[in-house]
Amino acid sequence: MLNDSFRYQNGELTCDGVLLREITASQGTPTYVYSANRLIQNAQRLQQAFAPLGATLHYSLKANNNLAIIRLLAGLGLGMDAVSAGEIYRAQQAGVDPSHIVFAGVGKTREELTYALQVGVGWFNVESHGELHLLNQLAGALKKYPSVALRLNPDVQAKTHHHIATGHFGAKFGMSAETIAHILAHRAETPHLNIHGLHVHIGSQLGDVNETVEAVRRAQQIADPYPDLRTLNIGGGFPVRYVERDEYPQPEHFAHALAPILSGWQVMMEPGRSIVADAGALLISVLYLKDQAGQHFAITDGSMTELIRPALYEAVHPILPMKNAPVTQKMIIVGPVCESTDVLNREAMLPTLQTGDLLAVMVAGAYGMVMASNYNMRTRPAEILVEGDQWRVVRRRETWDDLLRQELS
Ligand code: LLP
C-alpha cells in the first residue's frame, strides 16, 4: 500500500525520499517509521473536507501518542482527544493547551476528573449518570464550571469489525436517548456543569456514511428542545484503506452527507486513524524461512507485541519487500512470540526471500506502537520521524533495563 510518501525509488522502498534501509542500518529492526509529510497531508485533507461545516478537529491521541506527532499536529491547529489523564498529561508535555483537549472515556476515575478540572480541559464527554454527578461534585469543590457533552449511544450498528463498533446498544459506550433526555430535563441538579453539547461516536473504520448520518440525526432529535445545546461532537472513525481491494467512503463523503444537516451547529471531530495510519510503517527483518504443511513461513523479528491488530481484529496489513522484485510466492509472515496468533499476515504475496531481508508492514501508524506490549520480555521498538528529507529518532528502542526498572526485588 504505497502513497505519496511511501514508495519505491530505483527499486527500493523509501519514505519521502529517505531509503528505509538506511534507517534500519542505523537503528535496527523492528522499527516504526512515520512520515511527517503524510501526517500533515492527512490532517489538512480532513480540515479542508470539514471546513464548510466549521468543524474543529481534535486528534484522537489513542491512535498514536508520540510527543513529536502530537507537536506536529498541534502545530497545524488541531486540538486533542484524550481518554485518560495520562493522555492529557502527555499532550501537555507536548505543549498542548488543556483548553484544546476534549476528555472522553467510559471510566474516568475521580483522580482523573480532578486532574482534568484542575488543568482546565476544554470539554468533558460524559458517558454515565454516575460520572455526571461525580463531575458536578468535583467541579463544585474546585469552583469550576466545565463544558460537558453527553455521549449518546444512538443504537446504530456500524458496519465495521465487531471489536471496534461502539454505537449499538450492547456496547458499554454512551447513554441511551432516554437517559440523556432525563439528564437534560434535570440540568438544575448539576449546577456546576455547563451541559451544552452532545457526543456521538459509533465506531472506528466506519464503512457506511449513512450510519453516521443516522446517529447524528438521533442526537439532534434529543437536542431539539434545547436551543442552547447546539454543539455536536461527531467523534472519529473515518476509515482508511489497508489493502488495495478495500473500498471505503472518503472524508469528503462524510462531510458532504453531514453538511446539510449540521448547518447552525458547532461541530467537533475526533479523528485518529485517518490521520496517522498510512503515515506509518513497521520495518522488520526475516530471521528464518521454513516450509511446513505446504506453507511458506517467514519468521521475522516483528511480532504481535509490536503490532497486535492482525491478532486482535483479523486486520490485514500489507507487507512489502524493501527491494522491489517480482512476486513469486504466498508467505505467512509470523513473529517469534510463543502464541499461535502471532501472525502478521497470512497471505503476503512476496518475492523469494532470504534470511536478513527487510520487510515493511504498511499502514501501521495507527494503533500500532500505542498497543505494543512487552510480552515475552520484548522491548518496544524505536520510532523514527521522517521530516522532509531528514529523519530522527523520536523514541529510542527500549532496553531490558527499561523493562526491569519498575520492579522491586
Ligand atoms: N473518538 C472516540 C470516542 C473513540 O472511541 C475513538 C476510537 C476515536 C474517537 C478515534 O477513532 P478513529 O478515528 O481512530 O477511528 N484499536 C482499534 C481501534 C480502536 C478505536 C477506539 N476508539 C484498531 O486498531 O482498529
Image (cartoon, grey):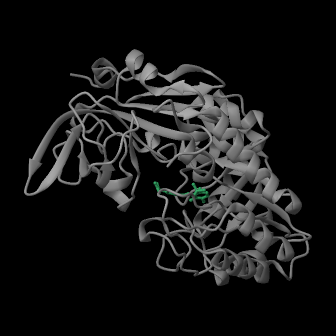
Above or below for 242 versus 200: above
Residue 49 occupies quadrant: bottom right
Q: Quadrant of residue 21?
A: top left
Extreme-left residue of the structure: 293
351 sits to left or right of 16 = left
What x and y, as percent, mark residue 213? Answer: 71, 77
Q: Is residue 284 left or right of residue 17?
A: left
**In the displayed structure image, the side of residue 342 where residue 205 appears, left or right:** right
| Ligand 1, image quadrant it occupies | bottom right
Q: Residue at x 26, y 33 (%)?
A: 301
Q: To which quarter of the image does residue 262 belong?
A: bottom right
Asked if 286 appears above or below 342 in the picture, the reply is above
The C terminus sits in image quarter:
top left
Q: Is residue 98 above or below residue 250?
A: above
Horizontally, residue 296 falls left or right of residue 301, namely left
Identify which residue, 370 or 205, lies in the foreground.
205
Q: Nearer the viewer, residue 283 or 171?
A: 283
Instruction: From the top left corner, tell me how far across and down residue 369 is, in percent.
Output: 44, 39
Q: Is residue 89 visible?
A: yes
- Residue 231 rendering spot, x and y as whole percentages: 82, 65
Decide which of 212, 41 is in the foreground and name it: 41
Q: Going by the picture, which residue comes out furthest to the top?
A: 26
Image location (x, y in percent) of residue 140: 74, 52
Q: Residue at x 70, y 58 (%)?
A: 136
The residue that appears at 67% across and 59% down in the rendered structure is: 125
Count of marks overlaid on the render: 0
Residue 195 vs 257, above or below: the answer is: above
Q: Nearer the viewer, residue 342 or 327?
A: 327
Q: Can I make out residue 121 in this image? A: no
